[in-house]
Image (cartoon, rainbow, N blue to C red):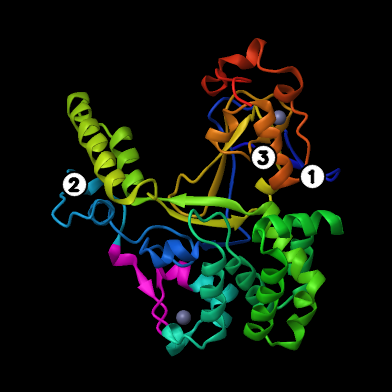
Amino acid sequence: MAEIKIADIGRSLVAIKDIEEDEELFSEEPFVSCQFSWNVACKYSACDFCMKPLETAEENVKRLTGNPDYTLPHPEYSNTDKNLHTYCPDCRIRYCSRLCFDKAYDSYHKVLCLRSSILDPDNPLVILNESWKQMHYPPETATVMLIARILAILKQHPSKAEIRSTLKIFCQKTVEEEAALAHKLLGDKFADQLSTLNNLFCVAFPDPELQEFLQPDAFRSLLALIGRNAQGIGTSPFYQWRTAIEESDLPEKEKKQLDKTIDQIYEDIDQVSGTFLNTEGSGLYLKQSAANHSCIPSARVTFPQNNHVLSLVASRAIKKGEEIFISYLDECELSRSKTSRQQALRENYLFNCNCERCEFGDSGESSSDSGDDDEEMSD
Ligand SMILES: [Zn+2]
Ligand SMILES: [Zn+2]
Ligand SMILES: [Zn+2]
């Protein structure tokens, strides 16, 4: 595994040895992660701690196609192990393993456990979650429930100073930048929603020791922190099964046949569930959040364990001492023109991109990227 040096000047990731294409640079667990609220409500059942799906691949396909009679070939390639599943004895929230329950309970669940109030519409944490759902409809891109978990971590952790300094690593913005990031996260009804949310948090977390984090300025900083740093997480039992089939030593002929089955499943899913295939959420990652953006990234974020453990993988060979860049834009945005890319980056991340591709266009060695073909066609 490659090691990464985190430089202090504005945070960046630098390779400390030569790295090959497709080599893993590092993997890391998030400081905190959380599944999106609508995603939970729509029955994408996953471990409440690590987001590993709790359905088998077959159950997943049955639900997403709306066809309870679907049978998936080779169910043995689904790695969902229900024997390991467990739940919180007090609120019945489910986990993929005893280890995940213990980790959640020790870091934030002791505070956030709703016990018998899980369906009580008057519980302040339930109100908070429902209110957020009314502010932020699918497709979901963020969740303020990350803030609830951060506050619970602050309350449970023996050293608030330690958590405070971790949060500082993520937060390096001016007041104006924070306001713009919070605004972006909450959309146009910003002013209303900011104070509404702030009040809901004050009711849900009345603890005197947390009040400093719930003052209007501090609360806005927390929103800006997740707006700027939260990394999307996606997991899927069907995708895990599909990848396991691809990597298996099944005969090529059988794999070809299975490819056809898989294509058909995607078509059937598309009819019923559209593009909502994954368990989705977001998390804060200390190392990954240090990586700066480029429109020709040298690394990509993956979730190979089908849970919230992030792996940064080199998209091409990287030389020792070179800065490592990821893309803050998704594949589709990345394939757009310079004008569209720069607009998206300015709006969502408040900076003007001056990466090589933005400065010099797509000529020369970088033009091999297939997504770049329609460069400068639109806008
Ligand atoms: Zn788990
Ligand atoms: Zn519980
Ligand atoms: Zn750029």
Between disc 3 and disc 1, whose residue precedes?
A: 1
- Identify whether 167 is placed above or below 149: above
* Side (left or right) of 263 relative to 309: left
| Residue 109 visible in rendering | yes
Q: Does dot 2 land on a helix, a strand or a loop?
A: loop
Between disc 3 and disc 2, whose residue precedes?
A: 2
Q: Over which residues does the magenta segment extend?
A: 82-101
Label 1 is placed on what type of residue? Arg
Task: Identify which residue, 222 or 257, lies in the foreground.
Answer: 222
- Identify whether 128 is placed above or below 53: below
| Residue 290 visible in rendering | no
The image quadrant of residue 374 is top right
* Side (left or right) of 227 relative to 140: right
Label 3 is placed on what type of residue? Ala
Residue neighbourhood size for the residue with mark 2, other residues' Cα within 10 Å, grouped as few (<14), some (14–19), many (≥20): some
| CB contact under 8 Å: marks 1 and 2 | no
> From the image, which quarter does the N terminus lie in?
top right
* Side (left or right) of 235 relative to 169: left
Disc marking residue 344 = 3
Q: CA–CA distance between discs 3 and 2?
A: 40 Å
> From the image, which quarter does the C terminus lie in?
top right
From the image, tell me which residue sits under label 1.
11
* Residue 119 percent across, percent down from the top left: 42, 84
| CB contact under 8 Å: marks 3 and 1 | no
